[in-house]
Amino acid sequence: MPQQEMGQGIHTAHAQLLAEEFDIAWDCIALEHAPADDLLYGGPRKRQGTGGSSSIRGGFVPVLRQAGADARALIVAAAASGWGVDPASCRTQAGVVFHDASGGRVDYGLLAAPAAALPAPATPAPLKDPASFRLIGTSAKRLDSPAKLNGSAVYGIDVKVPGARVATLAVSPVIGGKLRRVDDTAAKALAGVRQIVVLDDLVAVVGDHMWAAKQGLEALTIEWDDGANAELDSAAIWAKLRADAATPGVEAHRKGDAAATLAAAGAARLEAAYEMPFLAHAPMEPMNCTVHVEADRCTLWTGTQAQTRARAAAAAATRSAMASHRRAGAPGGRQ
């Protein structure tokens, strides 16, 4: 599964696309996360990630359905070759190839090796007519539900690395705000607090465990400089949005005369304004990341919508750290 399951059912939907064309029983499906690889799993955008409702649009026909249909064609060809019959005289159903004229039947599993040895189809295998769909468009049992219900699902925050410490953050409450000053005297005096990291717009407390880091964060005395957005509030934002909405926009395309058509039809004009409050684009799981930096590698565990971007960020940060380490005269590991 190259995309992330974030409760939107994409692992189930992708499995349906593939299983539909491959013609395999739903209870035979098992899922496994794909590794981070833009080239193999980036799709048309050449970037592996989950967002913008792109998972189905990107995988519906050009990738998953066609892959399933091509795999099914190879399985059928392998069965037909073994029986010495025309592939067109065979049919499939729920992971089994049948040759009704002779009564032959064989499971996909027994055909995997000979099918893998065949050359890929010269032309894409035909896709199913939507009228014959048995999985696409149905409410198949979701593949992600059992692990979430029985507690076996592993989230980023569940990762425990021996010897790892925990950091908690205080970030500027205003976009664009900066840290003016921080008094960490009380925090440093607490048992289990190991380090206070001060950056431009945040303070991090590193502790032996979550309780120490949390208590250390609460013990900080922080003063923020809210900057240019100090006076910005919801009322001002809504006033600006309403004013912009009342301003004529740029005409991108004109076809016909909507007003004249409505008038000729005697239709009434209806108008309505819809306003939604600001909502946090945040997961139910607290944002978190576990990182293990060694001399020659960096390993990270995190909940992310874009695994290759997370990997690239880790690579960039560790390259910079290694370069600084070497400039200081210390030996550095390979990047």
Image: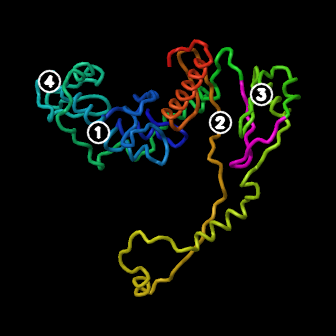
Q: Position of residue 237 (x, y in %)?
A: 68, 62
What residue does disc 4 label? 81
Residue ID at (67%, 65%): 238
Local secondary structure at mark 4: helix
Which mark is in front, 3 or 2?
A: 3
Q: Secondary structure at mark 2?
A: loop
Labels 4, 1: front one = 1
Per the model, the C-alpha gap separating discs 3 and 1 is: 54 Å
Q: Which residue is mark 3?
A: 196
- C-beta proximity under 8 Å, tags 4 and 3: no
Identify residue type, mark 2. Answer: Met
User: In front: mark 4 or mark 3?
Assistant: 3
| Depth order, front residue of 291/8 | 291
Residue in front for this viewpoint, 120 or 51: 51
**Left or right: 18 in relation to 88:** right
Identity, as a three-letter code, of the amino acid under mark 1: Gln
Among the two numbered marks 3 and 1 on one chain, the one whose residue lies closer to the N terminus: 1
Magenta span: 166-182
Name the residue carrying label 1: 66
**Spatial distance from mark 4 to mark 2, Cα to Cα?**
54 Å
Q: Does 259 sit above or below residue 117?
A: below
